Image: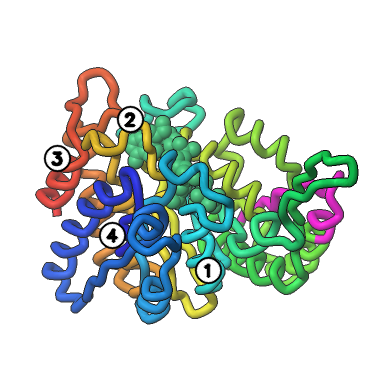
Amino acid sequence: MLPGDGIGPEIVAETEKVLNRINEQFDLGLQFDHGLVGGAAIDETGEPLPGKTLERAKKSDAILLGAVGGPKWDNLEMAKRPEKGLLGLRSNLELFANLRPAILYPQLASASSLKPEVVSGLDIMIVRELTGGIYFGQPRGVRTLEGGELQGFNTYVYSESEVRRIGRVAFEAARQRDGKLCSVDKANVLEVTAMWREIMDDLAKDYPDVELSHMYVDNAAMQLVRAPKQFDVIVTGNMFGDILSDEAAMLTGSIGMLPSASLNSEKQGMYEPCHGSAPDIAGQGIANPLATILSGAMMLRYSLGEEKAAGAIEAAVSRVLDQGLRTADIMSDGMQQVSTREMGDAVLAAL
Ligand SMILES: NC(=O)c1ccc[n+]([C@@H]2O[C@H](COP(=O)([O-])OP(=O)(O)OC[C@H]3O[C@@H](n4cnc5c(N)ncnc54)[C@H](O)[C@@H]3O)[C@@H](O)[C@H]2O)c1
Ligand SMILES: CC(C)[C@H](C(=O)O)[C@@H](O)C(=O)O
Ligand SMILES: [Mg+2]
């Protein structure tokens, strides 16, 4: 359990209550341990990812993370910022496959940014490459040119093996779902993503049951808000996936509803909501804990093999929404507004 910063500790506390209950109900024998990451770790140790946290994370079957970052640490140099703690966990554990399911709970149709008829039944899986691309490419930095002008630079790089392994995860996911995979790139401008497209085409030969299509990222951003149900599985690189998943979140009513799983090839995983530390609402007890609670369900499913327990959490969340309980971000007319803690308690009661 790595609560992190801002609303992180608030939403992880609710998720821990839920996981403790599930642990008892299903006799799972789970053991929880806690560690520091992000700004909280910087304040204690000077490092966003202390060695002790990384060591414990490596020994765990799964990690549940709240969120990292916040204005308190914004003036630090890049390498020292809280976000480096999160990126360090992802790269050190080789969590290359980030699954971000954007599912509209029917009860939240009126909270979606789009009209109910455009989003009803929405169920998209975004498969985001998480340990490569422009986030990790070298060289990177800011240098002073002759004459004193500053130049900032990052490198967008993917190797063939990196593209193949995320491609396989996406094709397998599509095979388990509606058999449709859309690969999102910028192959009209960037060589690295033109290569990405060719590799996806090559992989498609191994998955004749999956219908592969390609889309440029600018069009994909538009199509997601025009007609999102055309998508089943989307596969894309690190940065495009970051952006498109926040966009997709709003189709489901709120960023507070979008969970995620980040997996390595051993299915060890880190589970976290897609949103950040929400400094604007931290400490007020109003954050939506459901994305984190649903990330807990993904943890049971993908890393611990406890499908029934995962389903029980998802059913409990649905039940709570049926009861009309809403945190502020998903509030609509006629519903009952509840706090972070009340939402967690309601999920417990539903369990
Ligand atoms: N995985 C992570 O740890 C993660 C993800 C994204 C951003 N961040 C970091 O978080 C900090 C804040 O970033 P930001 O403001 O751009 O993005 P953010 O996701 O933290 O917040 C964006 C908006 O969404 C709202 N929001 C987010 N989660 C919510 C929830 N559970 N319930 C209700 N409302 C919620 C916030 O109040 C805010 O208005 C930055 O330091 C950023 O780097 C961390
Ligand atoms: C905090 C940041 C490093 C992170 C990312 O960009 O991957 C976040 O936005 C996310 O979506 O998990
Ligand atoms: Mg993001």
Q: Nearer the viewer, mark 4 or mark 1?
A: 1
- The percent coordinates of residue 158 (x first, y second) are 75, 64
| Residue 120 position in % (x across, y down) | 44, 34
In the image, the segment drawn in magenta is 180-195
Q: Which quarter of the rendering shows the N terminus?
A: bottom left
Q: Residue at x 33, y 30 (%)?
A: 329
Residue 88: percent from left, percent from top: 52, 65
Determine whether 179 is above or below 124 in the image. Answer: below
Q: Do labels 1 and 3 touch, CB within 8 Å?
A: no
Cα separation, mark 2 vs mark 1, equals 30 Å
CA separation, marks 3 and 2?
Answer: 14 Å
Q: Nearer the viewer, mark 3 or mark 4?
A: 3
Which amino acid does the dot numbered 2 rest on? Answer: Asp
Q: Which mark is residue 329?
A: 2
Residue 339 location (% of width, % of height): 19, 35
89 left or right, relative to 9: right
